Amino acid sequence: MKKHPVYIISFLTILGIICALLLSLVNLFTAPYIELNSKKELKDKLEQYGVTLDKIIDEDKNIEKVKASYEGSLEDKKKCYVFEVEANHSFVAKPVSVVVVLDKENGTIITFFTQGDIASGGYDANFKDNSLGVIGSNEKNFDSSFKPVSGASYTSNAFKDAFKIAFDQYQEMVGEQDD
């Protein structure tokens, strides 16, 4: 018995729609847990650097490429801003996610780290625990302090862009306090 192509196409279309609906339903239930897990990972990683998150800053105050902003404090009770920044990278499919911690008082870089893949071509190890010369620098002396990783210029530039975005977000936060 031969099946008419219209029946086969209709069957496959309905099957595809049912699968898409089921996938959407699963995503609806798992998305909040994925978001919570992501926030917990960030909080745990920040605790390794002695940073405690105190307050989430309203999303509307974030500039482009800043995924999230927080106010935090260090172990010595110094206040800081924590910015999760997306920087584009030519050889990694997804944007690089860099978390930058800036001193709230003067905008100097206290620490930074990445979430997920950061480099291609086996250069990941060159970026782990590498300060890139920027710890303690601010927007004014950042360019002269920055030390890129040799042979990984695209990844180094992605980090440099992330720091500049964090400085721009810091200026946005400081400008808002002045108002």
Image (tube, rainbow, N blue to C red):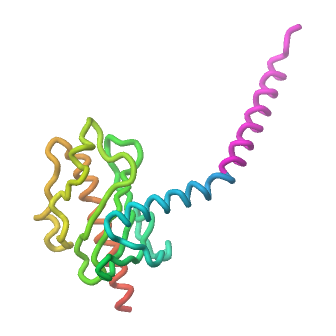
User: 179 or 9: which is nearer to us?
Assistant: 179
Would you place residue 90 above or below residue 77 in this image?
Answer: above
Rendered image quadrant of residue 48: bottom left
Quadrant, the C terminus: bottom left
What secondary structure characterizes most of the magenta part? helix
Count the numbered circles shown.
0
Kindly give the residue lying farthest to the left in the view shown: 144
Residue located at (39% from left, 76% from top): 72
First to last magenta residue range: 1-27
- State yes or no: residue 118 in magenta: no
Magenta stretch holds residue 7: yes
Residue 117 drawn at (x, y percent): 36, 46
Q: Vertically, is 77 above or below 152?
A: below
- Say which residue appears at 42% left-offset and 62% top-offset: 44
Quick one: quadrant of the N terminus?
Answer: top right
Which image quarter: residue 41? bottom left
